[in-house]
Image (cartoon, helix red, strand yellow):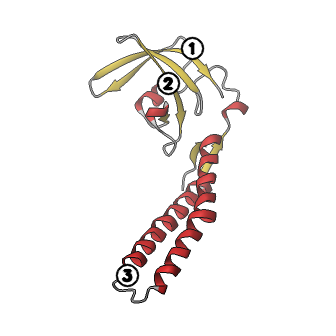
Amino acid sequence: MNKVPLTVKGAEKLRAELEELKTVVRPRIIAAIATAREHGDLKENAEYHAAREQQSFAEGRIKEIEAKLSNAQIIDVTKLDPGGKVVFGATVEIEDLDAEKTVIYQIVGEDEANIKEGRISIGSPIARALIGKEVGDIVTVKAPGGNVEYEILSIQYV
């Protein structure tokens, strides 16, 4: 399986979620199952079935996170020497030249992407257009509504 890029912060968030699932959620669900079993007939016990369903979701998420972390290539952008170019993990300020609107994006892995928080996936059209470019470069992004031109105003590696 191919290595999936992940920022240090993204890896930390996944590890924290995994720890929470294993040390808090899993024991709580096990206790809920035990309590529901005490109520008798399991066939018609809604509490038992709900707890088992929660257990299934939690165990599935644990496996998913463990797989992501084992296949992750954790990239610390602060330790790279990108030579002023846009790379994975960089935070880039760009201006839409038509709308004269400035936005700031951090280029992250697929699992970390959240447009509301300004994190875009490395596989997104904007990120693909920005990778390897420098401050002052103008990039053209093919968008559903037509091509959009952006100028790179700044690049940070934090």
In the displayed structure image, the side of residue 76 where residue 50 appears, left or right: left
Instruction: Work out how far the residue at label 2 is from the one at label 1, CA to CA, in angstroms.
Output: 10 Å
Residue 7 in view of the camera? no
Instruction: Work out how far the residue at label 1 is from the one at label 3, CA to CA, in angstroms.
Output: 62 Å
Disc 2 target residue: 130
Which callout, 1 or 3, points to the residue nearer the camera? Answer: 3
**Type of amino acid at the residue the image marks with label 1:** Val
Disc 3 target residue: 45
Q: Pointers 1 and 3 in contact (CB under 8 A)?
A: no
Q: Pointers 2 and 1 in contact (CB under 8 A)?
A: no
Disc 1 target residue: 135
- Mark sitting earlier along the chain (2/1): 2
Residue 124 placed where, x, y %?
Answer: 43, 34
Residue 149 placed where, x, y %?
Answer: 39, 16
In the displayed structure image, the side of residue 33 where residue 47 appears, left or right: left
- The residue sitting at 35% across, 18% down in the picture is 148
- Mark sitting earlier along the chain (1/3): 3
When the figure is inspected, residue 140 is found, relative to residue 127, above or below; the finding is: above
Pick out the residue farthest to the right: 79
- The residue sitting at 48% across, 43% down in the picture is 110
When the figure is inspected, residue 111 is found, relative to residue 67, above or below; the finding is: above
| Viewer-closest of 140 and 79 | 79
Instruction: Work out how far the residue at label 2 is from the one at label 3, CA to CA, in angstroms.
Output: 55 Å
Residue 58 in view of the camera? yes
When the figure is inspected, residue 117 is found, relative to residue 8, above or below; the finding is: above
**Type of amino acid at the residue the image marks with label 2:** Leu
- The residue sitting at 28% across, 28% down in the picture is 144
Q: Pointers 2 and 3 in contact (CB under 8 A)?
A: no
| Mark 2 element type | helix
- Mark sitting earlier along the chain (2/3): 3
Q: Would you call the spot at circle 3 few (<14 residues within 10 Å), some (14-19), or many (20 or more)?
A: few
Q: Would you call the spot at circle 2 few (<14 residues within 10 Å), some (14-19), or many (20 or more)?
A: many
